[in-house]
Image: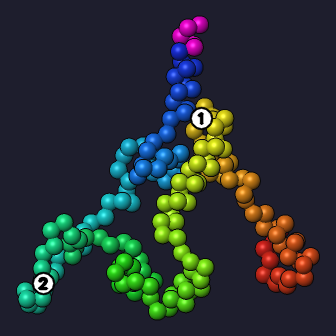
Amino acid sequence: MPRTLIILALVVLTACSSREESGIRETNLKQLRNPSGTPEEFSIVPNKPLETPESFAQLPPPTPGGANRTDQTPLRDAVAALGGSPSRLDPQAGIGAGDQALVARASRFGRQPGIREDLAAEDQEFRERRSLFNWRLVPTDTYNRVYRSQRLDSYRALDAARRAGVLTPSAPPQ
């Protein structure tokens, strides 16, 4: 009997565990990591091939701790492959001319610096309040369970829009 109680206590304690990352407590909403401990086959990417410039005067000055010309840049490569401009990804580039009107309209009532960190902290507090007495013996993906009450029912919104007289020619099928 005492052995059973000890095992039960250990199971309960491990069910309450979480981990700290970047100063914000994370409760594993979505598991996108490889849990097996083996190398992830999609994260192993070879370096770009070395290139010899026509003139060594064209070489940029070395930047200790900076990026190497042969380092992989998957986001920039994807933007270029889709026809975009990878230079727009640089933080120094600022807001592009095509997006300035959108940013001006979205920030017409002001912008709050650090909004992402504030929202992450508020979201963490919300999830902790919701999960206070909501633990399970088997770890599960809790994202949908925690945000179930905030989910939008698309068909109920569609019916409300139709009752209001809004034309909905491209409504999703039932």
Q: Which numbered disc, 1 or 2, marks the residue that appears first in the sequence?
A: 2
27, 72: nearer the viewer: 27
- In the figure, 146 relative to 154: above or below? above
Q: Is residue 89 left or right of residue 139?
A: left
Give the residue drawn at x 42%, y 50%: 23
Local packing at callout 2 (Cα closer than 10 Å; few below 14, some 14-19, many 20+) is few
Q: As displayed, is residue 34 above or below residue 159?
A: above
Q: Which residue is mark 1?
A: 138
Q: Is residue 16 above or below residue 35?
A: above
- Identify residue type, mark 1: Val
Helix, strand or loop at label 2? It is loop
Q: Is residue 86 left or right of residue 11?
A: left
Q: Position of residue 129 (x, y in %)?
A: 64, 43
41 vs 38: above or below = below
Question: Which residue is farthest left?
Answer: 56
Q: Quadrant of residue 57?
A: bottom left
Q: Is 4 part of what is drawn in magenta?
A: yes
Q: Quadrant of residue 77?
A: bottom left
- Residue at image x 88%, y 71%? 159
Residue at screen point 60% across, 31% down: 137
**Foreground of the two, 24 or 51:** 24
Q: Main secondary structure of the magenta part?
A: helix
C-alpha separation, residue under disc 1 versus residue under disc 2: 56 Å
Point out the stretch of residues depicted in magenta: 1-5
Amino acid residing under circle 2 = Leu
Query: Is residue 77 in view?
Result: no
What residue did someone put label 2 on?
59
| Crowd class of label 1 (few under 14; some 14 to 19; many from 20; radius 10 Å) | few
Residue 36 picture quarter = top left
- The percent position of residue 2, horizontal first and vertical second, equals 55, 8
Q: Percent position (x, y) of residue 93?
A: 36, 84
Check the picture and name the quadrant holding the C terminus.
bottom right
